[in-house]
Image (tube, rainbow, N blue to C red):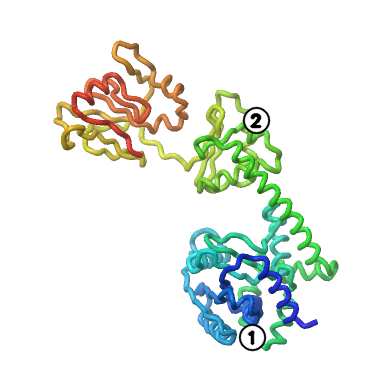
Amino acid sequence: MHAAADLERILDAGLSAIPPAPIAVALSGGLDSTVLLHALSVLPAARQRGLRAIHVDHGLHAQSSDWGRHCARISQRCAVPLQVIAVDVDRDGGLGLEAAARAARYAAFATALAEGEILALAHHRDDQTETVVLKLLRGAGPEGLGAMRTLRPLGQAWAWRPLLEVPRSVLRRHAGQAGLDWVEDPSNDDTRIERNFLRHEVLPILRKRWPRADASIGQSAAWIRAAADLVDAESIRALARLQGADPATLDWSGWLALADALRDPVLRRWLRNLDLPEPNRHQVAELARQLAQAEQDKLPCVRWPGAEVRRYRDLLHALAPLELPESAWETRWDGLPLELPAGLGTLTLEGMAKPTVALAESEQLLVRFRRGGERLRLHAGGGHRDLRDLFQEAGIPPWQRARMPIVLDRKGDILAVGKLCISAAGRAEFARLERSFDWNR
């Protein structure tokens, strides 16, 4: 069996199944990406699209410049243009060096790729096996256990992995037959890294006992991936049904009634669409527990770094952690734009018939936040209403009430409460001042 012919057949078939767009090979300089670039470079179907290579220099090893020079040599041999991108890897971000390097690499790819361009990645069947086993050991669900997909969106471009069913032994044989050389990353031998420990210590034992382990694991991943795709499609439909008019809300009883297989992915899709971080499985379980057990008048809330989900009435509300102003905060207001604390925006009192100027000291107002017990008259001649009742009638969630500015006159009468209402006294006072009140957030 000739490895080059095998790869050409596989890649030709793969090219016919992806969008007709230019291809950029992610070229590290290692065996896998070197073989992928070489194999694509001899295919007319790949060259006709437009073929190039991208090398990301992480700057993590003294030999990194050697890798760049090797990538330049193999690209020149294949008559393919090469783009080299140097990145700074965040060593102190808490991700770990391997994950931080990957994040920097894919950020570089996202910047370098044109809209619709296809990034060809050299992950092969052995990599797929390692990924499935690692995901299994980490307790992943169907999406994780489905492992790497042949084609998936990558920002405005595509990530294409045409070699996922090809053993690494075929790539090594191709390199030998084609007279290719490559560079070895010394970190690949460091068994303190989980993937390397699996590769060097665990999987050889499994393959000796079960020679078809890679093929069987790959087949299982394909089945799981198909199941994950079905769950994903159902989660889209379920989210469309449960999401409120405000995208940051969700019908909590409908969510709780979903099948176990749907509840988690619907929650995660909802949060991703809001650009909020996702919870771990324990936090999802805690949210479901609180919703199932809390009385109707309670306000369940589950928090994790960067996000929180709260229940109010019939809806879940997803939001970034809130900063509350100090309850004792208050200030005099001269009518010029007033920046509120805790990132709560700006109050304005614009002149309706003449330019806005500062109010005289005798006309200045007071601004503070809720302290409890506030009352106001909405209509001239009407009775006073508790602000608490107005909040409830308007459906203002409790956590938003303490963040709503209250404007008072010098006698202490409430003139306006955020965008909730302007009192009878407020309408009279703003008309007298010939000013229009607004709260810009």
Query: Residue tagged by mark 2?
Result: 292
Q: Residues within 10 Å of mark 1 (few under 14, many from 20)?
A: some
Q: In front: 5, or 59?
A: 5
Going by the image, does 335 lie left or right of 18? left
**Which mark lies nearer to you, 1 or 2?**
1
Residues at circles 1 and 2 in contact by the CB criterion of under 8 Å:
no
Which residue corresponds to the image point at 63% horizontal and 33% vertical from the top-left? 254
User: Residue 300: which disc?
Assistant: none
Type of amino acid under label 1 = Asp
Q: Can you name the residue that lies furthest to the bottom here?
A: 179
Where residue 245 appears, as percent x and y from the top left, is 51, 35
Helix, strand or loop status at disc 2: helix
Which quadrant does the C terminus fall into? top left
Q: Relative to 416, does residue 92 appear above or below in the rendering?
A: below
Query: Where residue 181 is drawn, which disc sits there?
Result: 1
The Cα–Cα distance between marks 1 and 2, rounded to whole angstroms, is: 61 Å
